[in-house]
Image (spheres, coloured by chain):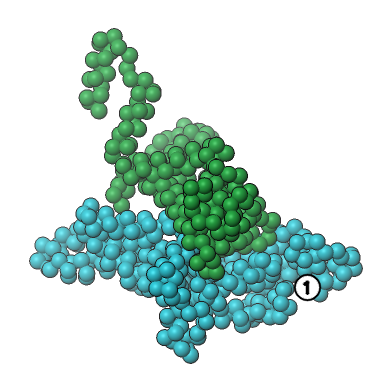
Amino acid sequence: MIDQTTEQATLAREGLPAPGLAARSWTGFTRFVRTKPLGAIGGLIVLLLVVVAALAPVLAPYDPRSTPALPWEAPNANYWLGADYVGRDVLSRLIYGARISLYVGLGSVVVGITGSFIIGVALTYIGGIVDTVSQRIVDALMSLPGLLIALAIMAVVTPSLNTVILAIVIGMIAPVIRTVRSQVLSLRELDYVTAATAIGAPPWRIILRHIVPNCFATYLVLATYYLGFAIIIESSLSFLGVGTPPDQPSWGGMLVRAASAHVKAGPWLAISPGLAIFLVVMGFNLLGDALRDVFDPRLRGR
Amino acid sequence: MSQYLIRRFLLFIPTMLLATILVFGLFSIVPGDAAVFLLTGEDASGTVTAEDFERLREDLGLNRPIYVQYADWLWGVVRGDLGISLYYGQPFGLELVERFARTFELAVLAIVMAFATAVPLGILSAMKQDSGMDYASRVIALLGIAMPTFWIGVLVIYALVYGTGWLPPLEYAHLWEDPIQNLKLMVLPAAVIGFHDMAFTARVTRSAMLEVMREDYMRTARSKGLREWVVVGRHALKNALLPVVTVSGYQFGRLLGGVIIVEQIFVVPGVGNFLIDAINHRDFPVIQGVILMTAAVVLLLNLIIDMLYGILDPRIRYS
């Protein structure tokens, strides 16, 4: 810290500009990579997922819905990862599958975490009977595993990517509200919030200026973890045959026929989609762990 | 003490009641009710006359106000009558209980296996923090969290078929009639589910142990000259395990979610197959029953754990 100030002072004396925003971000970035190598690997995997999803039409050698190969064709020079039970190229479906995972992951997190944040903050501020009753509802929802809630929702809606997102969101609301609530409750006790209340700041001002900005780190960490959660639930639903419609190349759906009956016919079918899910979920978890450490030094090493 | 137990028990009743409302409510907000699905078929291609529709709605009691339907359903549930399967047209309560027992057995087996491996792993990890052992166990924990259960299941089947040419016996045997055959059948799916839970439990054990290790009474125990294994085993573990058990109780629900998937892969005739079947047929009473039963088991388990916690840890009672 002291070094930095003297350095800046020296720079200022010599008439040179102090490091700008870009330079500071770069320093922050290199420090993150140096101190959190696992987090950086996680970030790299996430970046790779985004790039593959964005460039899917360029990267994929075939149309993911066309059937250029023979059914169960083993991996070869034309079809690097082999073909599935109707002759679709596994690599192309894998590449397009990145789009589905990313879309469902981001969609669930943006809708679910943002929504839960708004509800959580509002409930804590309204307080009283509303808060008590809603906490019991959260308890009741928490007694059901996310996958089971998602399955129940899928039973009453028409399967599509957006209904899958809805199903995942409902499953994540309760635990996120619980986390947000405890965060807001502890923030509310802080001196500067008391001070703001004392000078007569209205609740909306306290929420927007003092509570929400301080929840940002929690938001980011929750978002990273729940991205992984959403991707797992989406692939589980598709694996069970009630999620993403079968014509869309979901990673979970690609594993359906790989199980039991077709073990001997196409072993390659079971490896790549599972590996893709595993890597991406691990990437988000590693990144989430590192972000949590950076934002909350008290939890370091746990 | 008894005040704590009573208070905790009173909390259970409204939560359970809310769970029934949630479960019932979900299937009442469906656009077009069960009668429509029944008459028009799964792909909604059939045609119906208005009279057919009204008659069926009356038979199913769907023309009554929603709160009457709920009260009727709840009264049935209380008496152990979960209703009639729309698809098979017969009561399914007994079959559900039978299937749930198998699923429960699988889940308990999984949690026992997970606990038996996770706790030693977590302790070693915490005692030798930042060592190679710690690193290895954290990697295993990460694998367990990031590998989807169904993928592990598929890989295990592959390993069996290609490694040994042997597939698990797929005829289910009842625990009481043929316990050996039953366990043979259950041990692999339980291990697959347990792996995920093991990862999570090891993580919690590690951080709980790390926390306890910093306590004053640990220093006191060491300075008294107690052997290290007594310090860790009696003083640290006893305190560290309480939160681990609590968290595991809450984990149990998630474990049941994993069981649904693994049952599909290993063809265990548990509640998972029943549920997926019901979802494909839009058999709402069955889905309601499965979800309600899961919620009841999880809430009851949490109640028991919280009560045990209150008995074991005096700090809880007085707060």
Task: Determine the secondary structure under disc 1.
Answer: helix
Q: Position of residue A63 (x, y in %)?
A: 61, 44
The residue nearer to you, when weighing B201 against B158, is B158
The residue that label 1 is drawn on is: B60
Q: Position of residue A263 (x, y in %)?
A: 50, 66
Is A270 drawn above or below residue A94 in the view shown? below
Chain in cyan (letter): B
The kind of residue on which mark 1 rests is Leu
Q: Position of residue B74 (x, y in %)?
A: 66, 73
Quadrant housing residue A84: bottom right
In which quadrant will I find the N terminus of chain B? bottom left
Q: Is residue B176 visible?
A: yes
The residue nearer to you, when weighing B166 against A132, is B166
Is B193 drawn above or below residue A138 in the view shown? below
Q: Colour of chain A?
A: green
In which quadrant will I find the C terminus of chain B? bottom left
